[in-house]
Image (cartoon, grey):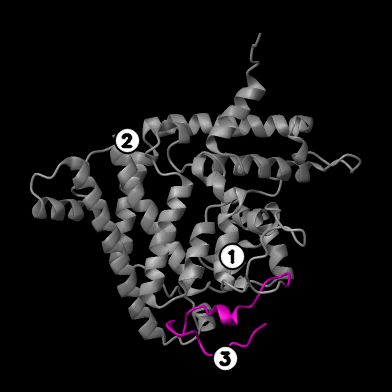
Amino acid sequence: MKSKNKPIAPGLAPYAADPASSRGRRFAEAESRTRTPFARDRDRIIHTSAFRRLKEKTQVFVAHEGDYYRTRLTHSIEVAQIARSLAHALGLNVDLAETVALAHDLGHPPFGHAGEDELSRCMAGKGGFDHNVQTFRVVTQLERRYPGFDGLNLTWETLEGVAKHNGPILARLAEPAYSYLADYCAAFDLWPASYASAEAQVAALADDIAYNNHDVDDGLQAGLFTLEDLVDVPLIGPAIAGVRRDWPGLDPTMLRLEAVRRMIGAMVEDVLAETSLRVKASGVAHADEVRGLDYPLVAFSLTMAEDLARLRAFLHARMYRHFRVNRTRSQARRIVAELFALFVAEPDTLPPEWQDPVGSPASDGEALARRVCDYLAGMTDRFAIEEHRRLFSLDLWG
């Protein structure tokens, strides 16, 4: 472990993560001649198959419903852009913030929250399922690209950010779904009782900013609600009014785009202002002092948090539970449930690389369920639909 007293890199705030003082990797490797440790982590994530598959994983809509809705790949890129901007403005390590942002959705299954809810139900009593833990498993175990270790062998700081970007996890380690993280922390302590770095906190807030704004944008494009429906909704309503005042008669498409852009700007400025106040009040002067606080250093103001809660309530009522979305969710749950049940009952229908190796003892029930869960969680929306068709519809050919 490197000394915490080493001078911070030029241009970084004293409480930023300094790559020169990284706690290193679980498995020792020679350092890169051309990249910092955090930039190297970012590159490893970008080159994973899990990252590529995000292009056809969705959050609200299903990939085949239209090519203008966000996928988890485009969402992750948007989160990374916002995280970079916030980190730069706050004097934080841009590479680390971007890396955590790019990694944060790697463990999401197909069909968004519907897929996750169904996998959680299928895995009840079999170890559970949580997309954050699955992301951690992807980067530490499931991606196999190096001869010396499973996973990506990311730095301590990146792994900490992946595990804890939403806050301390100590209280959750007793949950079945978190058993993998509990075992990992026992071998490579990620300080589960503390908050993560300021950079990881930036990534978490960037995620909130991105998904709230693009859900408004996607919901408008899908026709689930209109601009007029939004005029009394916090954040987006004032943004719409401001655009109409500055650009009378602007066409609806440009009005939508400009209003969403302004809402993103307002949320970014709020994070910068609130975080600056917290930095001054806390007096933090080192990255570990950020971890030692009993509250997040990077945050929305109370007013913004209240406005966001009201915006989310609107989106929940008018978008996430819209009957068209509910129909898609219903189909998605059935596909996941039926695939899971079939693979557990007939594991010889799994692709060879997901079956027990020849000559090895047969997996016990929980191990088989986990293997099936990993296979399903890695699927894209389109692949899950096609796999279901292949297994449940007997094709005719001649």
Q: Residue at x 62, y 33 (%)?
A: 337
Q: Above or below — where is 95 with respect to 262?
A: below
Label 1 crowd (10 A; few <14 / some 14-19 / many >=20): many
Label 2 crowd (10 A; few <14 / some 14-19 / many >=20): some
3D distance between C-alphas at marks 1 and 2: 36 Å
Q: What secondary structure is found at the residue carrying circle 1?
A: helix
Pointer 1 residue? 41
State whether residue 110 appears in this view. Answer: yes
Task: Kindly identify the amino acid type of the residue bearing the numbered disc 3.
Answer: Asn
Q: What secondary structure is found at the residue carrying circle 2?
A: helix
Question: Which dot marks residue 222?
Answer: 2
Q: Position of residue 61 (x, y in %)?
A: 43, 37
Q: Residue at x 73, y 34 (%)?
A: 351
Q: Position of residue 223 (x, y in %)?
A: 28, 34
Q: Is residue 108 left or right of residue 253?
A: right
Magenta stretch containing residue 21, yes or no?
Answer: yes
Q: Quadrant of residue 348?
A: top right
Stretch of the chain drawn in magenta: 1-28
Pointer 3 residue? 5
Magenta stretch containing residue 224, yes or no?
Answer: no
Label 3 crowd (10 A; few <14 / some 14-19 / many >=20): few
Task: Kindly identify the amino acid type of the residue bearing the numbered disc 1.
Answer: Asp
Q: Nearer the viewer, mark 2 or mark 3?
A: 3
Q: Main secondary structure of the magenta part?
A: loop
Quadrant of the frame with the C terminus: top right
Q: Is residue 126 left or right of residue 69?
A: right
